[in-house]
Image: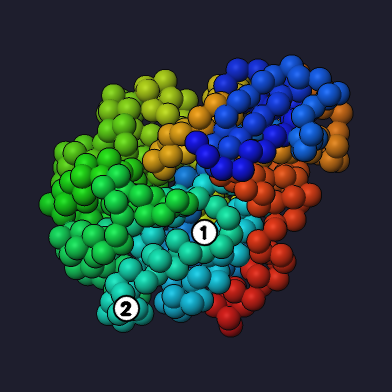
Amino acid sequence: MTGEVRRWHAELAWLGAGDVQAGVLIEAAGPVLRTVTPGVAASGLPAGTERLAGLTLPGLANAHSHAFHRALRGVTEQGQGTFWTWRERMYQVAGRLTPDSYLALARAVYAEMALAGVTCVGEFHYLHHGPDGVPYADPNEMGRALLLAAEQAGLRITLLDTCYLSGGLALSGRAEPLAPVQRRFSDGTAERWAERVAGLGCDKHGVLAPHARAGAAIHSVRAVPPDQMHPVVAWTHGFGAPLHAHLSEQPAENEASVAAYGLTPAQVLDGAGALGPRSTLVHATHLTRQDIALLGGSRSCACFCPSTEAFLADGIGPAAALAAAGCPLSLGSDSHAVVDLLQEARLVELGERLLTGERGHFGAAALAAAACGAGHACLGWPEAGEIVPGAVADLVTIRLDTPRLAGTAAPSALAPVIFAGTAADVSQVVISGRDVVRDGQHLLVPDVPAALTAAIRPLLS
Ligand SMILES: [Zn+2]
């Protein structure tokens, strides 16, 4: 591997498994880690070695994002409502976005993610067409805006291009027509979805650019009839690409699915061949025991978004049961009510505690692994998420001298970081060997709050 050789000396580092190590000398050549050596004294380091004060983690993967939902932060938190009333407000923003305004918004949102230590985002993208449902001159113009936004914010991205065909599934089991705002989401049929995605121009491994890979998503059993799922599944097999789907976020989805098909949503996806080690089911909140066995037996990943699931009053999913059944867990900030993967990680354990009245279901290392290695793997970046030779050179350093983390004892630093740390404690972020955040400042998007404000205000006025 060629590229500029860089060296860092991490005061403490968690390498992706095991215990926290002290004095870790890390060497990279370009975007790839070359050597990782714990127990190196701070004296006598090679010239040019950069010191990383605090605890350094592998890159965090935000495995489930809808970038445009960030515009609704704070707007829908007052008063009463449900997932379904929130969705109406979300659709108002969806109706206003253009490729230019989406580029500006997504760049600012991804910059906020980088400040929080996110090195790779999985963008579950269904805002494909113009407001009237007519494709842009380049029918992938919105997707390309997201790819460019990630590049400009310094992140890697997996564009999970989403098939979305129906307006919903009524409790009667009837497929509902698309509402006017939903016309932007639909390609009409799964075959036409596949034709459009072919225009993205990925190589035979699904690679779009050095920072970008392609994946696919079935929006949900609400939005894709079972007979339309196969072309999406087949496309992922052709590229070895990840396949994501929203699953059982709300009880109403299960009721409608059973009414329509006599099957739970997990059973519908299984029947369509949509479960397996390259598949990720997002939320997986309201599952039967058989659903959990089905997901675990298929080694599908379950992506939990606990902040969003709480903000939308979805419920608490069976994380421990899914993990015990064989599902890797990953994490997403989804609606971006909060962008903080450390918070998402601890809420998985705290949800289990609230459900069971007992502590100790997921330790700090298991939660960090969900945020790092499992998150990257479910986005089709299995070589990222650990600090080991040959891995992608991502380093996320968290200060331990902040008000939240001061007093942390060195060998056990991972537990306080996972259970008390926040995005505000992230000081340095290296993504694919390149500095993106230094001393808490984004180096590519100099004023992230101003960029967010400028992008969001016009969408809400
Ligand atoms: Zn989602």
> Badge 1 local density, few (<14 within 10 Å), some, or many (20+)?
many
| Residue sitting at x 29%, y 59% | 201
Question: Counting residues from the N terminus, which is met first, the one under dot 2 or under dot 1?
Answer: 2
Circle 2 SS class? loop
Q: Quadrant of residue 25?
A: top right
Of residues 319 and 108, the one nearer the viewer is 108
Of residues 96 and 378, the one nearer the viewer is 378
Instruction: Give residue 304's position: percent from left, percent from top.
Output: 48, 40
Q: Quadrant of residue 77?
A: bottom right
Q: Is residue 108 above or below residue 369?
A: below
Colour convention of the picture: rainbow
| Residue sitting at x 50%, y 70% | 103
Would you say 333 lies left or right of 85 here?
right
Tell me if residue 125 can be seen: yes
Quarter occupied by the C terminus: bottom right
Q: Amino acid at mark 2?
A: Tyr
Q: Are marks 2 and 1 in contact (CB under 8 Å)?
A: no
Residue 58 circle label: none
Q: Residue furthest left?
A: 227
Circle 1 SS class? helix
Instruction: Give residue 122's position: percent from left, percent from top.
Output: 45, 50
Q: Amino acid at mark 1?
A: Ala
| Residue sitting at x 65%, y 70% | 451
| Residue sitting at x 26%, y 64% | 199
* Alpha carbon distance from label 2 to label 1: 21 Å
> Badge 2 local density, few (<14 within 10 Å), some, or many (20+)?
some
Instruction: Give residue 134's position: percent from left, percent from top.
Output: 27, 80
| Residue named by callout 2 | 136
Label 2 CB, ligand 1: below 8 Å?
A: no
Of residues 333 and 102, the one nearer the viewer is 102
Q: Is residue 323 above or below residue 383?
A: above
| Residue named by callout 1 | 150
